[in-house]
Amino acid sequence: MLAGGHADYVDVVSLSDIEAVVGVGRTVAGDIRKEAQELLASGYDPSTAYVPQNDR
């Protein structure tokens, strides 16, 4: 994931990179990337691990 993370740029991480790092197939890699995008869009900050209250 990009430092600081931004939902608009999650797709710069290729599915093949996610597959290799996590050891999953393409479908699961796509699901992981989609979840990351949703987390970032909802306000999650990977640099501080901040999770918005409505996600807890």
Image (cartoon, rainbow, N blue to C red):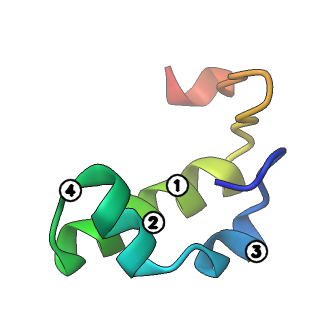
Q: Secondary structure at mark 1?
A: helix
Numbered mark located on residue 8 in the image: 3
The residue that mark 2 highlights is 33
Expressed as whole percent of the image width and height from the top left, the position of residue 50 reads 72, 22
The residue that mark 1 highlights is 36
Q: Mark 2: which amino acid? A: Arg
Expressed as whole percent of the image width and height from the top left, the position of residue 16 reads 37, 79
Task: State the residue at coordinates (44%, 57%).
Answer: 35
Asked where in the image residue 44 lies, by quadrant, the reply is: top right
Q: Mark 1: which amino acid? A: Ala
Q: Secondary structure at mark 4?
A: loop
Q: Circle 1: is it few (<14), some (14-19), or many (20+) Cα within 10 Å? A: many
Quick one: label 2 or label 4, which is nearer the N terminus?
4
Q: Secondary structure at mark 2?
A: helix
Numbered mark located on residue 23 in the image: 4
Q: Circle 2: is it few (<14), some (14-19), or many (20+) Cα within 10 Å? A: many
Asked if the residues shown at circle 3 and circle 4 are in contact, with their CB atoms under 8 angstroms apart, the answer is no
In the rendered image, the vertical position of residue 48 relative to residue 9, given as above or below: above
Task: State the residue at coordinates (21%, 67%).
Answer: 28
User: Distance between the Cα atoms at labels 1 and 2?
Assistant: 5 Å
Asked if the residues shown at circle 1 and circle 2 are in contact, with their CB atoms under 8 angstroms apart, the answer is yes
Q: Is residue 17 left or right of residue 11?
A: left
User: Distance between the Cα atoms at labels 1 and 4?
Assistant: 17 Å
User: Distance between the Cα atoms at labels 3 and 4?
Assistant: 24 Å
Task: State the residue at coordinates (76%, 74%).
Answer: 8
In the displayed orientation, state which residue is furthest to the right: 4
Residue 54 versus residue 15: which sits nearer the camera? Answer: 15
Expressed as whole percent of the image width and height from the top left, the position of residue 2 reads 74, 55
Task: State the residue at coordinates (80%, 47%).
Answer: 3
User: Distance between the Cα atoms at labels 2 and 3?
Assistant: 12 Å
User: Distance between the Cα atoms at labels 2 and 4?
Assistant: 14 Å
Quick one: label 3 or label 4, which is nearer the N terminus?
3
